[in-house]
Image: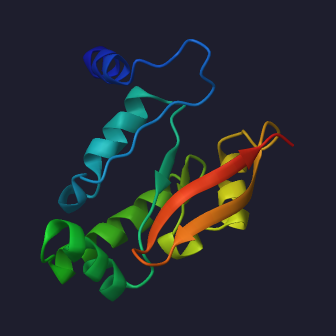
């Protein structure tokens, strides 16, 4: 556990003034029901997890296919079920944010989950509809 902590903190190299640190990962051991993420949660008992997917597997496969090439329906369905199960099992430490919910309301709920809602809030989210990507989010102090 100590080696895992040191490795991850060395990679992230957070500022001593940071209130929230984190990273994004898209490859987890979904076939093992996220045992690697379970281990990370054990190593960092104060860690919180944000899980993101699409509600529509067909839309998710289309999006993933644009980036990674063709994707397997069963593997994607299994990954989504693993995330849902993980979120239910760790409801106090996980936040599910479907890509269809990238909006001010849900981003502000995420700030609340992270304990940052008294420090800032979202006022707008810009969507790039041509490529279906999020361009940026705007934060302002309360």
Colour scheme employed for the rendering of this structure: rainbow
- Picture quarter containing residue 19? top right
Residue depicted at 35% across the width and 35% down the height: 40
Identify whether 15 is placed above or below 45: above
Q: Residue at x 14, y 78 (%)?
A: 72
82 left or right, relative to 111: left
Q: Quadrant of the N terminus?
A: top left
Numbered-mark total? 0
Decide: is 57 above or below 142: below
Q: How far across and down, in percent of the image, does residue 45 sit?
A: 49, 30
Drawn side of residue 101 relative to residue 72, left or right: right
Residue found 71% across the figure and 39% down from its top:
115
Tell me the quarter of the picture where residue 125 sits: bottom right
Task: Tell whether 73 sits left or right of 97.
Answer: left
For this orientation, the residue located farthest to the top is: 16
42 or 134: nearer the viewer: 134
Examine the rendered structure and indicate whether residue 80 appears above or below residue 74: above
**Residue at left offset 38%, top offset 45%:** 24
* Residue closest to the far front: 130
- The quarter of the picture where residue 58 lies is bottom left
Quadrant where the image shows the C terminus? top right
Q: Where residue 30 sits: x, y (%)? A: 24, 59
Q: In this view, does 109 lie to the left or right of 65?
A: right
Q: Is residue 7 above or below residue 37?
A: above
């Amino acid at each position: 556990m100590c080696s895992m902590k040191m490795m991850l903190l060395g990679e992230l190299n957070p500022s001593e003034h940071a209130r929230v640190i984190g990273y994004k990962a898209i490859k987890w051991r979904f076939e093992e029901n996220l045992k690697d993420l379970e281990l990370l949660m054990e190593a960092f008992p104060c860690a919180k997890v944000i899980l993101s997917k699409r509600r529509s597997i067909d839309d998710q496969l289309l999006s993933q296919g644009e980036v990674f090439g063709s994707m397997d329906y069963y593997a994607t369905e299994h990954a989504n079920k693993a995330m849902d199960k993980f979120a239910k099992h760790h409801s106090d430490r996980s936040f599910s944010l479907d890509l269809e919910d990238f909006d001010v309301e849900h981003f502000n709920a995420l700030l609340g989950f992270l304990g940052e809602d008294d420090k800032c809030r979202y006022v707008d989210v810009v969507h790039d509809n041509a490529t279906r990507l999020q361009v940026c989010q705007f934060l302002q102090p309360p």
